[in-house]
Amino acid sequence: MAAGAAAAAFSQAPPPLRPPAPLLPALLLLLLLLLLPAPPPVSAQGLKKAASAGLGADSVYTKTAAVQQNAALSRLTSQAERFTTLFKNNPAAACSRNSQTMCGSSSGSESSDALTFAASPQAFDARAQRLASPVRDQGACTTCTASALMSAVEAAVAAALKRDAREKQYSVQNFHFCGGVGSPGELTGCSTSVGVDTAVKGMGERPKSIILDRCLPYAPSNFQPNCDRKCNDVDPDLSAGRIGFTKLGSPMEVQKHIRDWGGVITRLDIWSDFKPFFKASRSGVYSGPSSAVFQIAHSVLLLPNAPASQPPTPPAAPPPPPASGYWIFKNSWGPDWGMGGYGKISYDATGTGILSPDDTYGIIFNPITPPRLSYRLCHHPTRRECYITRAPPGTWPSKMANDLQMNLKELLRDNTRVIKDLSKPLPAADLVVCDLQDGIPKRAAPCATPTPELACTEGAPPSSVRDVHLRSISDVGGQAELRVAWGLPKGNACVRQYNVQILNIETLKSTKVVIPLTNSNAAGSIVFKTKPFVPGRPRPVFLIQVVAANKAGASAAQSLSVNTGKVSSVFDG
């Protein structure tokens, strides 16, 4: 009997015969059971059921994808370890502008990913970084996707504003039941399945459906959804910015997004051995189904590997993850499940749907007014495009590059004298950062005192400058603007000036520039514009020579050939 039919029967006039007294408790119990929310069907807890209940076509694809993803992670880890060793042995040689080095211009995206991986901590836990909001309990309703999505939004806002994700939670009740995921004006029910793709796009189309949890706390029901809000308060911080999303493909994209934004929402297919596994081993690493039957499609918030248990404490020297590696995921089955609501799943796991390309998204929050940076930027004494700064304690190279929105390769190349080990946080020493976006210096603290000049001697001429390179080239009104930079010579000989000669190879006309130094231990750079290009004629080639000099003499020249139509490589001259 349906719940509506039962209510109608009890609202009719009393029948001529009263039911026997022993039947009354049974009828009341039946009515109570009908009024309770029914458990969701095993085929869905927020996502559509997989193509087959066994290891069919959908699962075969997932197995293949998982094998490919794990192979990519293995290559990434191996290359990162090689980079770490090379850099530790000789930072300048490992990270020069030579196209074949790990910081070279010709290194591909996989090499760049490996470099980022090498310059990051071995283990990362969003909970230890205050990017994890409290664990939710979806109860008997199919609200796992909304739960995972609200957790991802909370993490992204916390990451952008440098606040604790536990400060403010957003309403799963309002998003799932009251118009966040359905068509405009449509209410969804307790057993309505919602895919990750649908939920994320619904959030993008209707951001005002994200309201504070205190306005409409979670209270699922089988009957009319409770949309009687106590308030319509949107988080003012959320209103002062823009929520976005991005579809993620590779494991490295997922790893990087989690470290930047706290989590990634993805699919997790539940098989018949899943719940028994975590019941027997709350902190175990699930390796995928084995002779199991498909039960439900689920959504979770994915985190990278981390050795800490819940609640975490950041270790002084985190041990490396297991050889195979594992993900941590935030579930929505309450804090009594798994490790305080979290579980682990192996990188090698197949048939689980993790990182399914159609169901893996990262959430991004861009505030209109970003928070202040924890860096003090001092103008570089000779390089106008550069600053001198120090990283906050415990900051890794990859995080500093991300904080200052600069290229990691540039950060490492400019600081090989200071950064000696990629497997450790940055030292408490002055670092050079260049070509920052306009808004970054405005968010940093002003320089307190000038950078002190290091001791040097003028008993001998300086050695040659290092790493003359083209930092940028651009077309400005029909002429080229070139920015060339170079590193400080080796040794402790003072440098009082840089003598630069710019020779046009075609006309043999040259321009000479003297750059005096106030800091005798500074690298240098120069910006110059060519004459307007002549239509139909080849663009000019320039030879730029740089000499370091002091009172004792001058160094040998270092040269760079620049074709304004095509950039060539650095060579000694």
Image (cartoon, grey):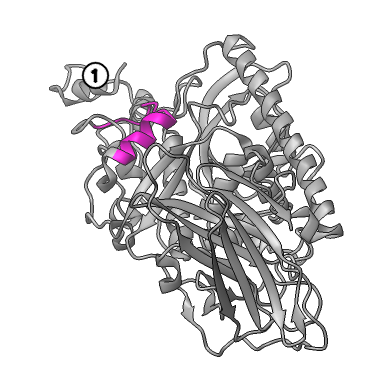
Q: Is residue 348 visible?
A: no
Read off the residue under disc 1.
5
Q: For the residue marked with disc 1, what is the amino acid?
A: Ala
Check the picture and name the quadrant holding the N terminus.
top left
Left or right: residue 348 compared with residue 145: right
Residue 412 picture location, percent across and down: 68, 60
In the rendered view, tell whether residue 449 sits above or below residue 221: below
Q: Does the magenta segment cover residue 190?
A: yes
Residue 438 in the image, given as x and y percentages of width and height: 41, 65
Q: Is residue 144 above or below residue 430?
A: above
Magenta-span inclusion, residue 131:
no
The answer to whether any part of residue 187 appears in the image is yes
How many callouts does the rendering have? 1
Residue at horizontal 31 percent and vertical 48 percent from the top: 210
Pick the residue in front: 560 or 487. Answer: 560
Q: Residue at x 27, y 56 (%)?
A: 234
Residue projecting furthest to the left: 13
Q: Which residues are magenta?
A: 187-204
Q: At numbered mark 1, what does the secondary structure look like: helix, strand or loop? A: helix
Q: Position of residue 326 (x, y in %)?
A: 71, 40
Question: In the depicted view, which residue is nearer to us: 39 or 291?
Answer: 291
**Image quarter of residue 62:** top right
Which picture quadrant has residue 430? bottom right
